[in-house]
Amino acid sequence: MKGKIIYQLHLTPTTAILDNTVAYKEKMKELSVLSLICSCFYPEARNKLVSEFEGMDQHGSNTINKRRSGQAFEVILKPPSPVSDVAHNLPSPPKRDISLEDIEKKLEAAEDRRKYQEAQVLRALAEKRDHEREVLLKAMEENSNFSKMAEEKLQMKMDQIKENRDAHLAAMIERLQEKEIHAALVRKNKELREELTA
């Protein structure tokens, strides 16, 4: 039989590829012994079954009823395509002889690529180093500015504390002087009263 057979199996975890003969044998197994005996006496039933399988040779498809195991498949016959007869091997291009100059050119190109990649790596490292240096300088500058600001703030706070302390001391001295003057005045008045009463 000339043709391509495509099986489509449904409702089965495993699939088996069967050709027409195997399909016919499977179909015959499914028939009961009684129907097999009857087919001997009644050839029209056998001819019907044979014609059923012969109909598949006409490049069509024939669906076989679902089997007791749950398998169902469809046999599709297609005419052979003209492309399938042609060899799929494409001719390989002819090998050309590699000369010493070609090898030297390839080696020089590889060396140039290596140097270029090395230069790129060095450039990337230099850029990274410059960036790290800039970040470090910026951090040092910010730290220095913060230190200066903190020092100025502390100095201003200490100056304010000193001014407050001086003002407090001056106020205490002034109060003490006022008390001393008041006490001297009270003593003087007391002495005058004592002199007047004496």
Image (tube, helix red, strand yellow):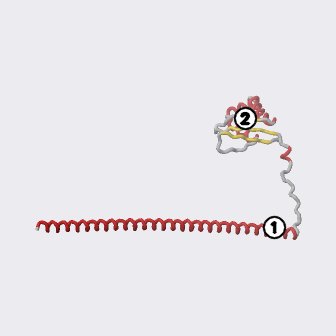
Please name the residue shown 77% across and 66% down the image: 113
Tell me the quarter of the image containing the C terminus. Answer: bottom left
Helix, strand or loop under label 2 = strand
CA distance for labels 2 and 1: 65 Å
- Position of residue 38 relative to residue 131, above or below, is above
Depth-wise, is mark 2 or mark 1 nearer the camera? 1
| Residue pictured at 72% horizontal, 37% vertical | 74
- Left or right: where does residue 18 sit relative to residue 133? right
Report the front residue among 164 and 148.
164
- Amino acid type of disc 1? Ala
Kindly identify the residue that appears in the image at 79 percent across and 39 percent down: 77
Residue 103: where, in percent of width, then height? 84, 69
Categorize mark 2 by other alpha carbons within 10 Å: few (<14), some (14-19), many (20+): few
Quadrant in which residue 178 is drawn: bottom left
What residue does disc 1 label? 109
Q: Residue 152 or 47: which is nearer the viewer?
A: 152
Mark 2 = which residue?
A: 63
- Quadrant that contains the N terminus: top right
